[in-house]
Amino acid sequence: METWTQYILLYLPEGSKYYSLLFLVAFAESLPIVGLLVPGSTVIVLAGFLIVAGKGNLAALIMVATVGALFGDLLSMWLGKRYGGIFLRMRFFRRRRKMIRYAQKFFVTHGGKSLFFARFLGPIRGIVPFIAGLSQIPRGAGAIYILISSILWGICYPGIGYLGGSSLQQAQNLGVRLGLAIIVLLLIVIVHYQVKKLFK
């Protein structure tokens, strides 16, 4: 076991406290403002990596990551629906108008599907559900996309860390491949949308 891994293990809590911490990380990353400050995906991949060193259980990690992501996205969407106008007048949001406009355009272009893709696109992960709520997306439709993306994220990111347990570099390479696969899928959807629009 590498020295840095042993050092990390010394400072991590045990049992339910450990999983509660991971839940909070996955949950917080999904929220507007807070999500920009919390490296949730990195922490969850690292937690998967540490399973190989004997820290935690893969099934439990997948569960807490999925539920944390799900609740975080649902809360973000509810905040947008209920308090969107108030949030947008805050200084933090006013300073990030470019990112807000990008998230709005992304949502307008892809509708409910944007909730799925945003889960895998770091900077707008917590903003798109918020924008969806602000845009009054039907609750049921939004929840379905969020549920599917949360399950996939909750499986993939711990899985990346676990499969790359032999070295951190391998885990990072797997993460890059997953990111590229999501981008390719996103490009396919965009092209499909443009072609469909062209032949209307």
Image (cartoon, rainbow, N blue to C red):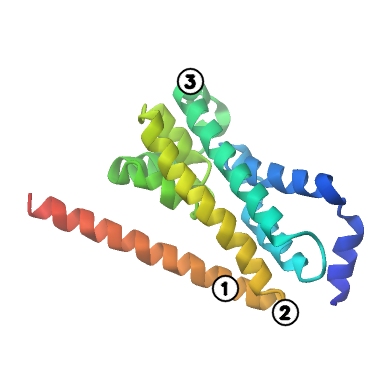
> Earlier along the polypeptide chain: callout 2 or callout 1?
2
Q: Residue at x 47, y 24 (%)?
A: 84
Residue 57's place in the image compared with 68, above or below, is below
Is the residue marked by circle 2 packed among few (<14), some (14-19), or many (20+) residues within 10 Å?
Answer: some
> Earlier along the polypeptide chain: callout 3 or callout 2?
3
Q: Residue at x 57, y 73 (%)?
A: 174
Left of 82 or right of it: where is 141?
A: left
Residue 167's place in the image compared with 65, above or below, is below
Is the residue marked by circle 1 packed among few (<14), some (14-19), or many (20+) residues within 10 Å?
Answer: some
Q: Which mark is residue 174?
A: 1
Nearer to the camera, 117 or 153: 153
On the question of residue 97 being in view, the answer is no
Question: Residue 112 appears at what percent x and percent y?
Answer: 35, 42
* Type of amino acid under label 1: Leu
Which image quadrant is residue 45 in? bottom right
Task: Determine which residue is flagged by label 2.
Answer: 166
Residue 182's place in the image compared with 109, above or below, is below
Which quadrant, please, contains the N terminus?
Answer: bottom right
Question: Residue 39 appears at what percent x and percent y?
Answer: 66, 52
Q: CA distance from mark 3 to mark 2?
A: 46 Å
* Type of amino acid under label 2: Ser
Q: Residue at x 48, y 20 (%)?
A: 82
Task: Determine which residue is flagged by label 3.
Answer: 82
* Type of amino acid under label 3: Arg
Does dot 3 land on a helix, a strand or a loop?
helix
Does dot 2 land on a helix, a strand or a loop?
loop
